[in-house]
Image: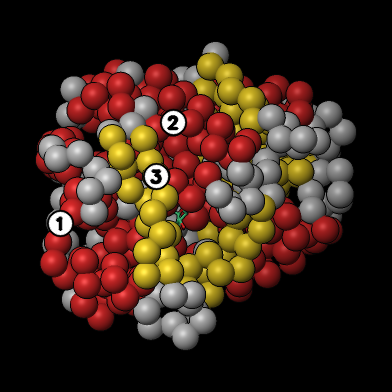
Amino acid sequence: MNTLTVALPGREYDILIERGLLAQAGERLRAVLPRARKLAVVTDTTVGPLYYNRVKAGLESAGFECRLFAVPAGEDSKNPSQLAALWEGFMDFGLTRTDGVVALGGGVVGDLAGFAAATILRGVAFVQIPTTLLAQVDSSVGGKVAVDLAHGKNLAGAFYQPRLVLMDPDALDTLPLPVFMAGMAEVVKYGCIWDGGFFDFLAARPSRQALMADIEHILYTCCDIKRQVVMEDELDTGLRMILNFGHTLGHAYELAGRYIEWSHGEAVAAGMCAAARLGVKLGVTPAGTPEAIENALSALGLPIAIPCSREDRAAAIGLDKKSAGADITLILLDKTGHAVPRKLPRKDLLELLEETL
Ligand code: NAD
Ligand code: GLY
């Protein structure tokens, strides 16, 4: 068993990583929720049929009464109506403050169920069982929970840490290839921003098969980096911003594809390449770095450039919003394995992008 501890004052929790862990959910949850009687298990319509019965059998044998709450698979479920439906469903189930909510699924389910857990009865215990690569390396750790609003993604949310994160790499076997590779964009990001040796390790494994052979090490390394960042800056006012490497341009690309053509991971992949090229132009990033990142990502079938209009770039940079301050903090690399924030006027960034990309 690989165990990492997120040591936040008064809210310490473990991340457990092991093949076959889904079947041990009962005993693992009982250890952190000794008094809970009922568990609301939130999942989606794809993950439920694949994994709910396995998890439920373990939870019931550990004495929990479970009820399934399955939302339609996909980002559209991360909305206030689904949140309200969960609140009412939890009350119908008779959930009390000593009971708990379990998220079984990808980042959509984790963010939605986590916000429901944070807000029902002013907060009940929450456990993450992430089943996508993105959720395992990123969204299940660190306590950001949210739903989307008509005005944009993740606009209503909270910081609400789970009591336990239970990660079974075997669950990744059923992921469609593009969903697996979208998660790999975030994995490569950790190598770019924190650990050059890890970047090289990933670059030497350019296939799903090769990556899955070392998946426990990969999950452990990513979660260890995220854990350290979150312990230093839980509320995202400083260091945690480095996790946004590739995301500013990534948002522009998601917008350019109207959130249909490019997944978040694909957009982040191209966004990291753009940020690396921009870093070279600004004299922060060493020459050759963009090419190394592009090679690693394109070997995984991820895009390294995405067409995008000036208007979409301006919107992603916040130039379309009167409320946005004059400056933007961009995350750049001063070497592969180390990120640095660089503040620059939004208008200058837009012009630089025109010249660079
Ligand atoms: P997702 O939850 O929509 O999952 C992607 C698809 O894979 C879905 O269709 C899902 O049903 C399916 N799926 C999940 N697990 C599966 C499995 N084991 N086998 C087969 N299919 C499976 O998307 P995601 O990429 O996991 O997460 C994206 C969401 O995460 C976004 O809403 C994003 O905002 C959020 N996010 C949150 C944080 C955070 O810190 N909270 C960080 C990054 C992303
Ligand atoms: N996914 C970025 C963060 O957790 O801060």
Q: Which residue is mark 1?
A: 305
Mark sitting earlier along the chain (3/1): 1
Query: Residue 216 in the image: x percent, y percent?
Result: 41, 20
Mark sitting earlier along the chain (1/2): 2
In the image, taking residue 129 as reference, residue 91 lies left or right, namely right
| Residue in view at x 31 percent, y 59 percent | 250
Asked if residue 69 shows in the view, the reply is no
Q: Which residue is mark 2?
A: 222
Q: Secondary structure at mark 3?
A: strand
| Residue in view at x 56 percent, y 32 percent | 228
Question: Separation of disc 3 and disc 2 at Cα?
Answer: 19 Å
Q: Closest to the observer: 105 or 290?
A: 290
Q: In the image, is residue 167 above or below residue 149?
A: above
Specify the label residue 340 is tagged with.
3
Q: Closest to the observer: 287 or 167?
A: 287
Q: Within 8 Å of ligand 1, the CB of disc 1?
A: no
Q: Residue 218 sits in which quadrant?
A: top left
Of badges 3 and 2, nearer the viewer stands: 3
Query: Residue 127 in the image: x percent, y percent?
Result: 66, 39
> What colour scheme governs how the chains and residues are painted in the rendered image of this protein?
secondary structure
Query: Residue 190 in the image: x percent, y percent?
Result: 38, 36
| Residue in view at x 68 percent, y 44 percent | 161
Q: Secondary structure at mark 2?
A: helix
In the image, taking residue 18 as reference, residue 119 lies left or right, namely right
Asked if residue 278 shows in the view, the reply is yes
Q: Which residue, as the protein is rendered here, is positioned at the far bottom?
A: 322
Q: Are marks 3 and 2 in contact (CB under 8 Å)?
A: no
Q: In the image, is residue 92 above or below residue 231?
A: below
